[in-house]
Image (cartoon, rainbow, N blue to C red):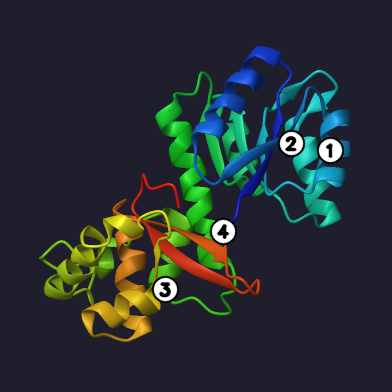
Amino acid sequence: MTTLRVLIIEDDPRIAELHCRFVEKVTGFEVVGMALNIAEAREMAELLSPDLLLLDLYLPDGHGMDLLHELRGQGQQVDVVLITAAKEVSAIQQSLQAGAFDYLVKPVMFKRFEEALYNFQRYRGQLYGATKLNQSEIDQLRHGHVSSANVDNSGVPKGIDLLTLGKVQHVFHDHDSQANEGLSAEQVGASIGASRSTARRYLEYLITTGELRADVVYGSVGRPERRYFSPHSEG
């Protein structure tokens, strides 16, 4: 399982330690550093190449937005989840416009914290290796759900057959012993007698409902593969 690297930027050591413990509870993430100010954060971001910053807005030597703009200007491939006490609409708007992946208000409850990280994990997994996305997949990336315009009277998106959906769900129920390894779209497709692309469409839908999660794993020759897990498996 690919581990996503997290850099915590928070001037209160107690809060930084709390967020560190939160990260350690979420499968697929590790803390690679904790910075107490922008100067430390700038150096650590360059040296450690984190995948995700957990960033406070108000720091002793400046504003978190300054660091965000600086990293974006340098073209660093890192995403940002803001964790701050700021509730002003202007701060929220500026942060999201600058490209923050999520915005959490202190004090953060673990459930919401975990949700933000798993959403980020799904986002990175879906983008990895993809060259094109359809509208439904874009909607999932942007909003974490399927647009209501594409949902029929059964409550599932158009193109999702309930019978086939049930077959996919049963595949995971019948593979509990392999929960830690996950399943690929090809494996699921073979199990239900469908193509890999068809299986992937149903698997990605189940991610939006929270029944599954996905991650990129590497085989013995280093080739990345997107695999699907039940939400609480340790894959």
Q: Marks 4 and 2: which is nearer the front? A: 4
Q: Residues within 10 Å of mark 4 (few under 14, many from 20)?
A: some
Q: Nearer the viewer, residue 6 or 3?
A: 3
- Mark nearer the N terminus (1 vs 3): 1
- Circles 3 and 4: CB atoms closer than 8 Å: no
* Residue that carries the numbered disc 2 in the rendered image: 65
Instruction: Say which mark, if any, is on residue 44.
Output: 1
Mark 4 to mark 2 CA distance (whole Å): 22 Å
- Mark nearer the N terminus (3 vs 2): 2
- Circles 1 and 3: CB atoms closer than 8 Å: no
Residue type of the residue flagged with mark 3: Gln
* Res. 46 in view: yes
Instruction: Say which mark, if any, is on residue 222.
Output: none
- Mark nearer the N terminus (4 vs 2): 2
Quarter of the image where one finds residue 153? bottom left
Residue type of the residue flagged with mark 1: Met
Q: Residues within 10 Å of mark 1 (few under 14, many from 20)?
A: some
Q: Residues within 10 Å of mark 2 (few under 14, many from 20)?
A: some
In the rendered image, residue 175, in percent from the top left (x then y), is placed at 27, 62
Instruction: Say which mark, if any, is on residue 135.
Output: 3
In the rendered image, residue 45, in percent from the top left (x then y), is placed at 81, 42
Q: Marks 2 and 1: which is nearer the front? A: 1
Instruction: Say which mark, if any, is on residue 124.
Output: 4
Residue drawn at (62%, 27%) of the image: 20
- Circles 4 and 2: CB atoms closer than 8 Å: no
